[in-house]
Image: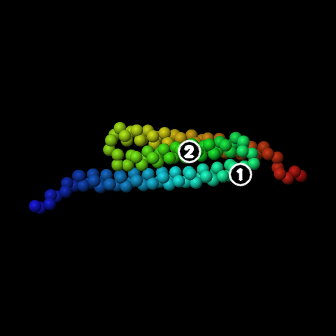
Amino acid sequence: MPKQPKDPKSEGKEDNYDKKLQLEKEVALGLWIQVIGQFIEIKGLSGLYQLEEDLYQLGEQQILTGAWIRTIGQLLEALSVQSQIGENDQIKLIQEQKLAITGDFLVSVGSAYEVMGGLRVLEEESVLPPRIVP
């Protein structure tokens, strides 16, 4: 039996679907790389915080807390985007999109909290007397 010619319209849709799927996978990979980077940053910040002479400096605590909030948000977003790849159930997609938005929100809140901590550290360090008094 001779082969049926492919419908050009359906072939274009398949190509488009494959391209979209590939791009979604790239987005997810980028998010996972960011999550790994966040955990590396948290490890470094936690180590630096433990080396501080005064562990009760509010600015340093805020920076570390903000980084943790950002990391949790980044992880939520990565998990959500990963779950959306190839998903056809509209209700599940919407739920995962809401989770991704929540992750984005946490990333933003964490970043803002880090900025406040950084400003506080700058203020605390600016108030300290110089080490060498003439």
Q: Is residue 107 left or right of residue 26?
A: right
Residue 118 visible in image = yes
Residue 58, picture quadrant: top right
Residue situated furthest bottom in the rendering: 2
Residue 111 visible in image = no
Q: Is residue 103 left or right of residue 114?
A: left
**3D distance between C-alphas at marks 1 and 2:** 22 Å
Residue position marked by numbered label 1 in the rendering:
51
Q: Position of residue 38 (x, y in %)?
A: 56, 51
Q: Which residue is pictured at 40% across the width and 38% down the height?
A: 95
Give the crowd class for mark 1: few <14, some 14-19, many >=20 residues within 10 Å.
Answer: few
Where 59 falls versus 3 (above or below)? above
Q: Amino acid at mark 2?
A: Arg
Residue position marked by numbered label 2 in the rendering:
70
Earlier-in-chain disc, 1 versus 2: 1
Q: Nearer the viewer, residue 124 or 58?
A: 58
What label does residue 124 carry, if any?
Answer: none
Q: Amino acid at mark 1?
A: Leu
Q: Position of residue 33 (x, y in %)?
A: 50, 54
Q: Position of residue 16 (x, y in %)?
A: 31, 53
Q: Which residue is pictured at 34% across the width and 55% down the height?
A: 19
Q: Which residue is pictured at 28% across the width and 53% down the height?
A: 14
